[in-house]
Image (spheres, rainbow, N blue to C red):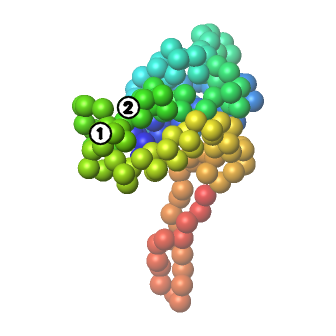
Amino acid sequence: MLSITSQYALRALSHLARQSGEAVLGRDLAQSVEIPANYLSKVLLTLRNAGLVDTTRGSGGGYRLGRPANDIHLIDVVELFEEVSHRKPSCFLGRTRPCSETKPCTAHSRWAGLQTAYLGFLVSTPLSAIAGNPGDFWASSSPMRVTPRVTNGSDHTGGIKE
């Protein structure tokens, strides 16, 4: 349901939320959340312009949240990168004319309830609810290593270690 850009933005912000206000260098952030550095810099620029991220140059500089994670809701991020808005719901089929109860598109009756639930989730969920904790398995995107496993004297790959 989210574009890769929105996913990247949420991953980067979630990582910053776990840093307790400490600045993170752009290259370290890109590596930690597995986002190409050039792509991430464009995402961070948009987030900075929206006041969601602060940047500091020089020694001790980097990126940090622009406001507390409890005060950033998912809709604040997603609206920057998607054509989704809790103020102006969109037509599922992407029609240019307004889609409403009085002039519904062919998907309107099935989409309306789901869209309401989806927008409700984005509006009511703060970043802090999805950021996780530093020790959580999914909190970081450290690469997994595949190591050989020996079973009955023959080598098989597929043993997964973190």
64 horizontally vs 153: left or right? right
Q: Is residue 148 above or below residue 117?
A: below
- Image quarter hosting the C terminus: bottom right
Residue 2 x %, y %:
43, 42
Q: Nearer the viewer, residue 29 or 84?
A: 84
- Left or right of 96, for residue 4: right
Q: Amino acid at mark 2?
A: Glu
* Outermost residue toward the front in this view: 102
Q: Residue at x 72, y 44 (%)?
A: 133
Residue 12 in sight here: no
Outermost residue, top side: 58
Percent position of residue 75, x then y: 53, 33
Residue at 30% from the left image edge and 32% from the top image edge: 98
Q: Tell me the tag on residue 103.
A: 1
| Few, some or many residues within 10 Å of mark 2 (<14, 14–19, 20+) | few
Q: Say how many tags the image has.
A: 2
Residue 56 seen anywhere in this rendered image of the structure? yes
Which residue carries the number 2 mark? 83
- Residue 37: percent from left, percent from top: 44, 29
Quadrant of the rendered image containing residue 93? top left
Residue at point 66% right, 12% down? 59
Q: What is the x, y in percent for residue 60?
A: 68, 16
Residue for point 61% across, 32% down: 73
Q: Quadrant of residue 19?
A: top right
Pointer 1 or 2: first along the chain: 2
Q: CA distance from mark 1 to mark 2?
A: 20 Å
**Amino acid type of the residue tagged 1 in the rendering:** Lys
